[in-house]
Image (cartoon, grey):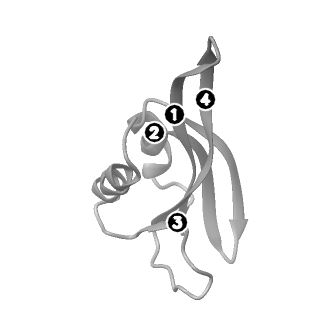
Amino acid sequence: MGRRTDLHDELKTLLGTSDCYFQPSPSLKLKYPCYVYSRDPSDTIRADNLMYRRVHKYSLTYITKNPDDPLVDETESHFQMCKFNRHYKADDLNHYHYDLFY
């Protein structure tokens, strides 16, 4: 289980730029392509009334103008516990949403 700052650095490296945003405010102007992510409830396994394992879950969205961007598939294959969830188009931008355990 890594720290959120480690995840942020890894996303920047994967993207090749610093355009990664953790829970950005609505007034922030995003640069595309970019990753936007936020924390979700952790996945916790308990045994004998004790916490056995906890993995932090993140809601990760890759936003790009290019519908055939190779980073769409590379994102899921880069992280061991990452699952593509859905795609939608808004404001002429493609949004690829993942569930990421890190």
Q: Quadrant of residue 38?
A: bottom right
User: Farthest residue toward the front?
Assistant: 49
Task: Name the mark on residue 102.
Answer: 2
Label 1 SS: strand
Q: Earlier in the sequence, mark 2 or mark 1?
A: 1
Circle 1 sits on which residue? 55
Q: 10 Å neighbourhood of mark 2: few (<14), some, or many (≥20)?
A: some
User: Quadrant location of the N terminus?
Assistant: top left
First in sequence: mark 2 or mark 3? 3
Q: Residues within 10 Å of mark 4 (few under 14, many from 20)?
A: few
Question: What is the secondary structure assignment of the residue under circle 3?
Answer: strand
Image point (62%, 82%), residue name: 26
CA separation in Å, label 4 and label 1:
7 Å
Is any part of residue 43 visible from this angle?
A: yes
Say which label, 3 or 4, has the lower sequence index: 4
Q: Nearer the viewer, mark 2 or mark 3?
A: 2
Q: Are marks 3 and 1 in contact (CB under 8 Å)?
A: no
Q: Which residue is mark 3?
A: 64
Q: Is residue 36 above or below residue 59?
A: below
Circle nearer the viewer, 4 or 2: 4
**Which amino acid does the dot numbered 3 rest on?**
Thr
Residue flagged by tag 4: what amino acid is it? Thr
How far from the left and from the top, in percent, is residue 4? 41, 52
Q: Looking at the image, is mark 3 or mark 1 earlier in the sequence? A: 1
Residue found 53% across the figure and 85% down from its top? 28
Spatial CA span between label 3 and label 1: 28 Å
Q: Secondary structure at mark 4?
A: strand
